[in-house]
Image (cartoon, rainbow, N blue to C red):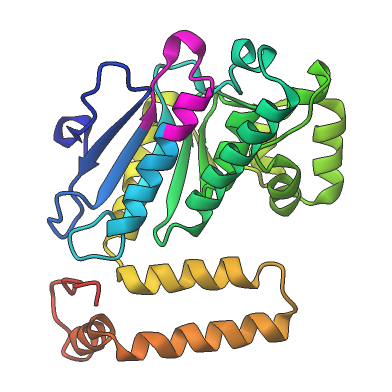
């Protein structure tokens, strides 16, 4: 897939986020949803309006994600070539009261929750700076692909602040508590190579290849059974903080649930009869 096949559905002149749908391997015209945070003049920094736009976009994804014609995977990236999201909008932060800050934090946390609970995978394609709220936004995604120019960090303590969009919790789950402490206490920025080494991101590419590779993985995911993908994501999320026996019980229940779906029957039939074409999933 290329940019040429993307259909941009965001037309409002004051929009801070662009949304484009791209076809999947089965011909579904909206299988891959490309969400681009587009405030390059502010290095795609997050203000209240931008967070609200993102929240509305991911809520709309959730409404159609498990339908036959709905999106199967989302790629989240930043506009321009300098930043994914350079952080929260410092000018906006400087004008906030403690009450305003609490509301902004809860709004950002709600966005992260919506991304994590979305029944389809979300790939963060980090094309530059992912600092503060930008790193937290990437961490809410299922996994991160990065360009070799990407920079990650939680530098809030350098300003007398701290992460407020879930960074203290998601970073430790991604890289372990000791590395999370080091990054959060120092506020240091790390490059893509170090992010890869510690498990913060999955893969690193030259900038020109980043979206190509994200699209390649998105196409592979979009070709799989959507209800199965949704249940895998539910099992991973539900079991992450539970004892293994509870997590395995959840896995068994979600496994069994799929045996009442038309997609599983279709997939098994296609395998048994050795059909040359992959099954056309119906998300039911």
Along the horizontal axis of the image, is 247 left or right of 40?
right
Along the horizontal axis of the image, is 72 left or right of 257?
left
Q: Please say if 64 is above or below 168.
A: below
Q: Can residue 165 be seen in this view?
A: yes
Along the horizontal axis of the image, is 225 left or right of 206?
left
Residue shown at the point (31%, 90%) measured from the top left: 260
39 within the magenta span: yes
Residue shown at the point (80%, 42%) measured from the top left: 180
Position of residue 256 measured from the top left corner of the image (x, y, whole percent): 43, 91
Q: Is residue 153 visible?
A: no
Q: Please say if 37 is above or below 117.
A: above
81 within the magenta span: no
- What number of labels is visible? 0
Q: Please say if 231 is above or below 81.
A: below
Quadrant of the rendered image containing residue 70: bottom left
* Residue closer to the observer: 165 or 283: 165
- The magenta segment is 36-52
Question: In the picture, which quadrant includes the C terminus?
Answer: bottom left
Question: In the picture, which quadrant includes the N terminus?
Answer: top left
Position of residue 37 measured from the top left corner of the image (x, y, whole percent): 41, 27
Position of residue 269 measured from the top left corner of the image (x, y, whole percent): 20, 89
Residue shown at the point (19%, 84%) measured from the top left: 270
Position of residue 22 measured from the top left corner of the image (x, y, whole percent): 20, 43
Residue shown at the point (16%, 71%) measured from the top left: 280
């Amino acid at each position: 897939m290329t940019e040429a096949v993307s259909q941009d559905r965001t037309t409002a002149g004051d929009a801070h986020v662009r949304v484009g749908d791209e076809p999947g391997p089965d011909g579904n015209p909206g299988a891959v949803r490309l969400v681009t945070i587009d405030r390059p003049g502010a290095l795609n920094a997050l203000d209240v309006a931008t967070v609200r736009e993102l929240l509305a976009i991911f809520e709309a994804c959730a409404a159609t994600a498990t339908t036959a014609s709905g999106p199967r995977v989302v790629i989240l990236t930043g506009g321009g070539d300098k930043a994914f999201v350079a952080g929260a909008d410092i000018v906006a932060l400087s004008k906030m009261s403690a009450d305003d800050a609490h509301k902004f934090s809860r709004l950002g946390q709600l966005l992260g929750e919506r991304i994590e609970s979305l029944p389809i995978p979300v790939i963060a394609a980090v094309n530059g700076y992912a600092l503060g709220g930008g790193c937290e936004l990437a961490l809410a995604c299922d996994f991160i692909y990065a360009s070799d120019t990407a920079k990650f960090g939680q530098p809030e303590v350098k300003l007398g602040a701290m992460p407020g969009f879930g960074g203290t919790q998601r970073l430790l789950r991604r890289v372990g508590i000791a590395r999370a402490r080091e990054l959060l206490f120092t506020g240091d920025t790390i490059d893509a190579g170090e992010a890869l080494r510690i498990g913060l991101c999955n893969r690193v590419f030259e900038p020109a290849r980043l979206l190509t590779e994200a699209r390649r993985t998105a196409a592979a995911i979009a070709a799989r059974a959507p209800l199965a993908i949704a249940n895998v994501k539910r099992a991973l999320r539900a079991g992450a903080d539970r004892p293994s026996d509870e997590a395995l019980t959840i896995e068994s229940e979600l496994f069994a649930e799929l045996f009442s779906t038309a997609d599983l029957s279709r997939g098994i039939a296609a395998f048994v009869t050795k059909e040359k074409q992959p099954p056309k999933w119906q998300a039911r």
